[in-house]
Amino acid sequence: MFPAFLIKSVGLGLLAVARLSSAELAVPSDLTVDMSVPGEVNLAWTAANLRPYQLEGSMDLLTWAKVGVPVVGSGAPVSMVDGPVSAARKFYRLRVGAVRPGFDRYSTQRNDDESSGLVPIGFPISLFGRTETHCYINNNGNITFDRQLIDWTPNPLQNLGFTIIAPFWADVDTRPAKSDVVRYSYSSETVDGHPAFGVNWMNVGYYSSRDDKLNSFQLILIERSDTGAGNYDMEFNYNQVLWETGDVSGGVNGYGGSPSRSGLTNGIDRTVELAGSSSPTIQLDANPATGQPNLLTGLIYRSRNSNIPGRYMFQVRGGSVLGALAVNAGPNQTLGQGSTIALDGSASDPGGGAVTVRWSVRKASGVVTFSDPDILNPTVIVPTIGVTELMLTATSVSDPNVSASDIVQIK
């Protein structure tokens, strides 16, 4: 559930209703409302130091609209005025945001699918057996180390063949007027006293030059050499996820098609993807068809290793991402004269935990039938014409926010 204060207008007065997550430690306080100026609603509150809060308004508790810009608390009182449009609003809420303030010292140019040159991280990080000191910041919601990545349609991360850290790999387009550009900082920011590197994709649009919906998310790497050389913590932070797909990735008005993927991998045999990655609509703040908030599946409402909704923290120790899974959909196959294939998948948690598995159809020219999609090695009947792609997804039982996927091709 989202932590929030709700203010409902009742006649000439206001009724305040507090709904707070028991896990949330720092919440807005002293929320007051003044309606003495005709046509205006004046709200005031005190926000915790260095914690961003977003004031939102609604008529029906289903569809929320931003009122002003996100506010970063300083521990001092904050006030905001909602003008004449407030007459249509019955509810207000202050929602905490996971994105950390700052990390915006440098910026990219407005672009569609471009990447930065090599950018220093500011400290060495050990990742999948390699030490990295620089990275490419890619406009489409990710960073890479060996190459720039301009690809706009996301694939299962493990099939890439190279290392990627992707808080939200999708077709970001920062060319439209209402979109901000990608911003980042290195060697100038800290988190809890530790040096930190960060990239902001705040209020970014999607292809092609669409800014009717904007997303806000962030990647933070936090140096933790106090626990061992090359060690660090990684955060994916989400404040707003209103679109998931660009127009040429099969999306319609930002939805459907091949939706965004969130996670990291060495591109070979170790992967962490957030559960729900690539699944249509469920990662969004709300279901676009109904307006109902995705309280159980939306990226801004869930968390990992954090009590802040929208924050997903990963520990990287000795080059290993704690919680990363191993999944293999098996070798590609040729049908020959038959249309029934025995799949040869494998999946495990190198940390020793249990996993569940699920086979799904990524691409097919006709109906695909599994003997049982929830076991590693089912038989499957596939169309005899064209190429069929099947995806095996493993999910951690002890950490259901973590999954990993791999693809097998049958032709």
Image: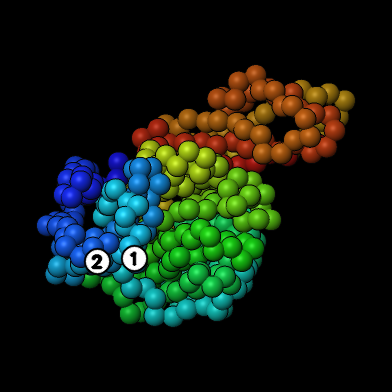
Q: Which mark is residue 80?
A: 2
- Residue 273 percent coordinates (x, y): 48, 47
Distance from Cα at disc 2 to Cα at disc 1: 8 Å
Q: Amino acid at mark 2?
A: Met
- Residue 400 percent coordinates (x, y): 40, 37
Q: Amino acid at mark 1?
A: Gly
Residue at figure coordinates x 62%, y 69% from the top left:
112
- Name the one closer to the observer, 109 or 18: 18
- Name the one closer to the observer, 251 or 124: 251
Whether residue 87 sits left or right of residue 140 in the image: it is: left
* Colour scheme: rainbow
Q: Residues within 10 Å of mark 2 (few under 14, many from 20)?
A: some
Q: Is residue 237 above or below residue 342?
A: below
Please tell me in which quadrant of the rendered image residue 319 appears.
Answer: bottom left
SS for tag 2?
Answer: strand
SS for tag 1?
Answer: loop
Residue at figure coordinates x 54%, y 73% from the top left:
177
Q: Which mark is residue 125?
A: none
User: Farthest residue toward the left?
Assistant: 30
Q: Is residue 297 above or below residue 132?
A: above
On-image quarter of the N terminus: top left
Visible in this render: residue 374? yes
What residue is shown with label 1? 68
Residue at figure coordinates x 33%, y 73% from the top left:
102
User: Farthest residue toward the right?
Assistant: 337
Sequence-first disc among 2 and 1: 1
Q: Are marks 2 and 1 in contact (CB under 8 Å)?
A: yes
Q: Residues within 10 Å of mark 1 (few under 14, many from 20)?
A: few
- Name the one closer to the observer, 237 or 338: 237
- Residue 386 percent coordinates (x, y): 83, 37
On-image quarter of the C terminus: top right
Q: Is residue 133 above or below residue 334?
A: below
